[in-house]
Image (cartoon, helix red, strand yellow):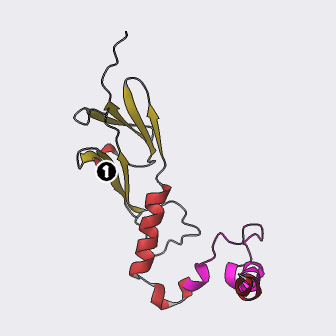
Amino acid sequence: MNWFLRNVLPLLLDMALNPFFFGRDQSIFDPLDRILEPFDRFPLWDNAPSRQFAQDVSAIASTRVDWLETPEAHIFKADLPGLKKEEIKVQVEDGRTLQISGERKKEEVEKTDKWHRVERTQGSFLRRFRLPENAKVEEVKAKVEDGVLFSYVCRPQMRGF
């Protein structure tokens, strides 16, 4: 830990405050936002499998899903802005695992266009949820509304005493 504080931390701080690394228009209050950008200048990072893996991990991690259990159903809500229902797949695998997957396509641009910032994730995403024993896996319904996927997995109806 002391080695990190002595050697790496000063380098990171220098990079954060140095316009060579982050450009003159970058705020010092957001110094770690583009920490890996200096490495974009090196050709060994171009189309590297490790970069694609990092993008895929980011896409998986950034797909936010809420899971609500009501007396009638398990309800999953996933934020998937910009995707059509044809681009999203909801299925049950291995008996009790709900899988939500899809792909955000890379936006095509003209060669004369210049990106200033790309923050929205692109690429494949996949989320899996192990359903409890009381889920009726044969009764899964899904719909997309305003960029939100709603998946419903029915539960057995509880009878009063």
Does residue 15 show up magenta in the picture? yes
| Position above or below: 17 against 103 | below
| Residue 99 on image: x %, y % | 32, 49
| Residue 71 on image: x %, y % | 41, 23
- Going by the image, does 145 lie left or right of 38? left
Q: Residue at x 56, y 85 (%)?
A: 39
Q: Residue at x 48, y 58 (%)?
A: 61
- Going by the image, does 3 lie left or right of 116? right
Q: Quickly name the residue at label 1.
A: 87
- Going by the image, does 8 lie left or right of 129? right
How dense is the environment of label 1, judged by Cα within 10 Å: few (below 14), some, or many (20 and up)? Answer: few
| Type of the residue with mark 1 | Glu
Magenta-drawn segment: 10-39
Q: Residue at x 32, y 20 (%)?
A: 157
| Position above or below: 14 against 141 | below
| Image quadrant containing the C terminus | top left
Q: Nearer the viewer, residue 114 or 126?
A: 126
